[in-house]
Image (cartoon, rainbow, N blue to C red):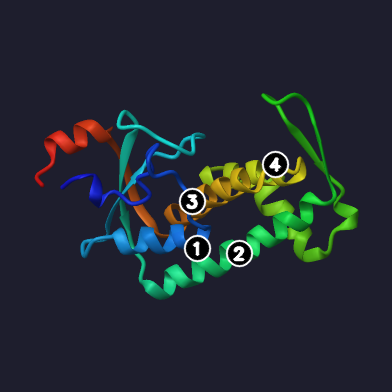
Amino acid sequence: MNTEMIALNNTTDNPLTMSPAETIKEMFDYTDENGVLYIPELTDDAVFDEDRRVCRCVMNWNRADAEKLIAEHQSLYDSLAKIAEVTEVSGDIFSLKFTVDTEALSKDLQAVVDTYLCGTETGDAVYRAKKLLKLMAINAPKAVINIEACFLAQAMAVHEYGQSMEVLDTIRTFNEESPV
């Protein structure tokens, strides 16, 4: 086993430039016949080094599930973009807070706010949705928004179809200890 078996293994020489749909497709393609998927640990960095940690996820999905997830992600992304138009962001760069004018939203968009932004749900997908909304609301560069959208896609896949996840050692150790 080596880093070529790790999906989304971005380096300085190979930064994350794929779309969220490509991210989901790559995750599915890298899931082995036993449902095992190795991915880098989710962090706030777009480019990683060999000292970041690897996660071993056991996934239960098929190609139709991956395609469905792509559509769900696109729908959520489009909804967040519309919500961002009526979102006010305040605070400094380290503690951005957002306020959504829910009265200006349709019932469908209010449901997205309730589920992903103001509800009691927790987890990586909710965290990533909130962060993506903030980036959209402050008109962050498209590349930054795309990277966060890919992180959201990864979090949604693991949340929806992951049966278990364990954090392994660093990529460097993973390479040294794994058979080629």
Picture quadrant where residue 80 is located? bottom right
Q: Quadrant of residue 34?
A: bottom left
**Which amino acid lies under the numbered mark 1 shown in the image of this protein?**
Ala
* Residue with the mark numbered 2: 74
CA distance separating discs 2 and 4: 19 Å
Horizontally, residue 90 falls left or right of residue 17, namely: right
Q: Secondary structure at mark 1?
A: helix
Pointer 1 and pointer 2: residues touching (CB < 8 Å)?
yes
**Cα distance in 3D space between marks 1 and 3:** 12 Å
Answer left or right for 4 relative to 70. Answer: left
Disc 4: which residue: 140
> Mark 3 highlights which residue?
17
Question: How far apart are the two marked residues, 3 and 4, measured between alpha carbons?
Answer: 16 Å
Q: Which mark is in front, 1 or 3? A: 3
Query: Looking at this view, is 18 or 135 the one in front?
Result: 18
In terms of secondary structure, where does tag 2 sit? Answer: helix
Residue at the spot of label 1: 21
The numbered mark, 2 or 3, whose residue comes first in the sequence reads 3
